[in-house]
Image: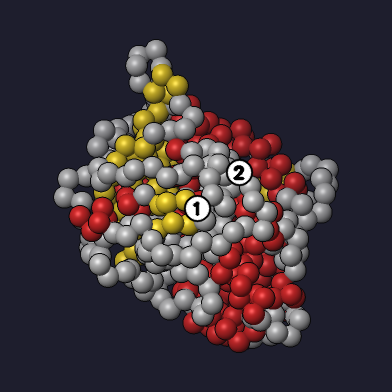
Amino acid sequence: MSRRIPRSRPVPGTAHRVPSANRRQRPASVRVLAVAVAAAACLGVSGAPASAAEAEPVVSRGVTIPAFYHPPAELPAANGTLIRHEPLPLGLSIPGLDGRPMPGTATRLMYRSTDSNGQPVGVTGAYIEPWAAWRGTGPRPLVAVASGTMGQGDQCAPSMALQFPLTLRGDTVSVGYEALAIYRILATGSAVVVTDYVGLGATDRLHTYVNRLDQGHALLDAARAARAVPGATVTPDSRVGLYGYSQGGGASAAAAELQPGYAPEVPLAGTYVGAPPADLTSVIKGIDGSALAGALGWSMNGFAQSDPALREVVETNINPTGRAALKDMSTMCVGDVLFSYGFANSTRWTNSGRSLGDIIAASPEAKAALDRQRIGNLKPAGPVRLATGVHDDIVPHRQARQLAVDWCRKGGNVTYEAVSLPNLGDKILTNHLVPLITDQGDAVSWLTDRLAGRTAGSNCWTMPLQP
């Protein structure tokens, strides 16, 4: 059987998705216990392409990716079209008094979206029909959740993490930390749809980490696809909320900007944007040398696949050590990369000994490519709540606050929340992760109010908006 090759040429020396049993397995430098993600997958929709079941298996760092995640060769014409579905057992679930599972019944999805080069792409994810009743006005609402950073290996997909919240298999470590936010949303009576993003889970290409268009499209198309899930009680009239923190905050922010032109029929009622990487030039400096330095590798891998200007920079400037690192990181989840590349400095990966940030800044073409990823050039649709920790040095606070200012200047309805906590340690992720937890309850409450039809006020007047 012919093997699926990514539509865009990958960087020489970096890994890409090839569904093959012969895909080389690389031992992790620190062997850790990881979550079991291998499950026999049967296609859950009548008429699903037989090629998915017959495709050669993909094995990523000791985890076999279920056949469900292999996109068909031909995709539907319309964005948001449901390609296939199957039941998804939730790893954290208990029987309710009425016999239904709590917090809800989950369905694994594959749906059609459009990537940053205008090409059709199959994206996976999950829909959860809540056990709790919706007590607000109108039909049951829907929250489209964009997960925070999970990794770049297919086994790191958020939909798999819902089934296996803590993994113990092969050379993979993955934790489904978004479950807390998802379950809090379900408890309000809102349905939830989660996107796996472009290329995370789906085996035909590499995950395009923090790509503005790919992420925004995937999130909006997940909201479209949710309406077609059998048994779903959401309707085309259901109010829709977007929710995301960190990588997810960038995705929800991008989707709020793109919705008027890309998915105007999605009735967007409100968007939560937590710690968004809005200015990647600034974020690259924040993550280089940090505990999450591997995210720099994920972004370079993804953009090298989708953007010729950044591909050229990588091909020209990365040394053999850097090429090996990028290839290794391309199949890693967050836990793997923290152990293997935590606090790495990109100067070790370049021919010149300069950092990747400095190299990109010196290349007009590469800098322009990153500038195209900038969020804040468009007015967001509907009310937005943007929160960021004042000491966040991984996704720097200053650039996140600047996004709020940019949106306010464009007339956006923005509620900005500076999460004030003590400095909890430089470059070790705590200043980035703790606000995720401390602000979560307020974020869910704010979004639930929007889904119930309550008006949101802006606090743009509290911020200086002069250039």
The correct choice, above or below, for 456 with respect to 117 in the image is above
Residue for badge 1: 62
**Residue 443: percent from left, percent from top:** 59, 38
Please tell me in which quadrant of the rendered image residue 269 appears: top left
Q: Residue at horizontal 55%, vertical 42%?
A: 168
Give the structural element (helix, strand or loop) at label 2: loop
Foreground residue among 274 and 301: 301
Residue shown at the point (64%, 51%) measured from the top left: 31
Q: Amino acid at mark 2?
A: Leu
Q: Is residue 262 visible?
A: no
Query: Residue at (33%, 68%) from the top-left corner?
Result: 4
301 w.r.t. 53: above or below: below
Residue at left 49%, top 29%? 92
The spot of residue 384 in percent (x, y) is 54, 48
Q: Give residue 33's mark.
A: 2
The answer, for residue 329, to whether it is visible in the render is yes
The total number of labels drawn is: 2
Which amino acid type is shown beneath numbered disc 1? Answer: Gly
Q: Tell whether 210 sits left or right of 17.
A: right
User: Going by the image, does 247 lie left or right of 242?
Assistant: right
**Which picture quadrant has residue 159?**
top left
> How far apart are labels 1 and 2 at the CA level?
11 Å
